[in-house]
């Protein structure tokens, strides 16, 4: 009897907390620098992106989707046509520096589950030269190319987050839970020249 009452009380408290979070989200979601009261459409594009030729040598870099927001088309971030082929290509092309990184940071070979660790570990060297145990100036070009690869590789995940948020936005608008939704959480997920970014500034 006591266990059932405790369990019931815990469930009621959790329900109240969840309801409070939903209400806070709904209030917050309708305020922001850029909002929409219309559903957002996402269309396939698949056009060649304007990036360095070194990135295209790894694997073609493309704009895969466009989001129509408030009547204006916003390209999502550019990504590799095939992420896994791109991963294989960069490991083959920049093998020497990647081996030095593995040794220095005691990492497994670069792959789809540890690439963020490589990206994070490279941050301190973005504005300075590589230390001698990473090849120093000898691998500076490779470092820049690996950083470029990792940035584009990450863009695929950022686009997925954007599309998820768009799905939530459309749900909230279609069910009329709110009259408008803030797009502030995804503004930074678009290229700097996208209309949504320009509208935010």
Image (cartoon, rainbow, N blue to C red):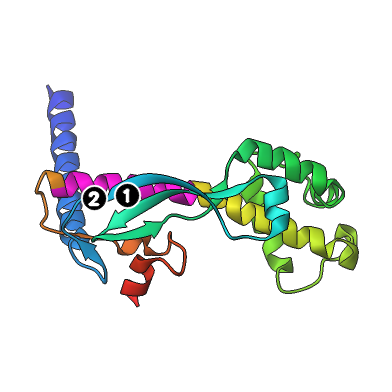
| 110 in relation to 184, above or below | above
Closer to the camera in the image, 124 or 88: 88
Q: Position of residue 121 (x, y in %)?
A: 70, 57
Q: Is residue 33 visible?
A: yes
Q: Is residue 167 left or right of residue 131?
A: left
Quadrant that contains the N terminus: top left
Magenta-drawn stretch contains 172: yes
Categorize mark 1 by other alpha carbons within 10 Å: few (<14), some (14-19), many (20+).
some
Can you identify the residue that label 1 sits on? 165
Q: Position of residue 174 (x, y in %)?
A: 14, 45
What residue is rendered at 78% in x and 46% in y? 106
Q: Which residues are magenta?
A: 157-173
Q: CA distance from mark 1 to mark 2?
A: 6 Å
What residue is rendered at 17% in x and 62% in y? 30
Q: Is residue 164 left or right of residue 11?
A: right
Q: Is residue 107 visible?
A: no
Can you identify the residue that label 2 sits on? 169
Closer to the camera in the image, 93 or 7: 93
Q: Secondary structure at mark 2?
A: helix
Quadrant that contains the C terminus: bottom left
Q: Is residue 56 left or right of residue 30?
A: right
Q: Is residue 27 left or right of residue 44?
A: left
What residue is rendered at 71% in x and 47% in y? 58
Rendered image quadrant of residue 145: bottom right
Q: Position of residue 112 (x, y in %)?
A: 62, 39
Rendered image quadrant of residue 144: bottom right
Residue sticking out furthest to the front: 47
| 66 in relation to 139, above or below | above
* Number of disc labels: 2
Q: Secondary structure at mark 1?
A: helix
Q: Position of residue 163 (x, y in %)?
A: 36, 46
State yes or no: discs 1 and 2 in contact (Cβ < 8 Å).
Answer: yes
């Amino acid at each position: 009897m006591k266990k059932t009452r405790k369990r019931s009380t815990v469930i009621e408290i959790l329900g109240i907390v969840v309801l409070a979070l939903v209400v806070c989200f709904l209030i917050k979601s309708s305020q922001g620098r850029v909002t929409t009261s219309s559903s957002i459409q996402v269309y396939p594009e698949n056009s060649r992106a304007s990036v360095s030729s070194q990135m295209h040598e790894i694997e073609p870099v493309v704009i895969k989707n466009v989001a129509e927001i408030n009547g204006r088309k916003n390209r999502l971030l550019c990504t590799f046509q095939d992420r896994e082929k791109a991963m294989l290509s960069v490991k083959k092309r920049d093998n020497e520096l990647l081996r030095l990184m593995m040794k220095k940071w005691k990492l497994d070979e670069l792959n789809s589950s540890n690439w963020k660790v490589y990206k994070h570990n490279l941050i301190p060297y973005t504005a300075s030269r590589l230390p001698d145990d990473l090849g120093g100036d000898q691998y500076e070009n490779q470092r820049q190319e690996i950083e470029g690869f990792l940035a584009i590789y990450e863009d695929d995940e950022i686009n997925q987050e954007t599309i998820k948020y768009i799905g939530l936005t459309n749900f909230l608008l279609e069910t009329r839970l709110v009259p408008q939704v803030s797009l502030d959480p995804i503004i930074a997920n678009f290229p700097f020249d996208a209309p949504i970014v320009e509208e935010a500034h």
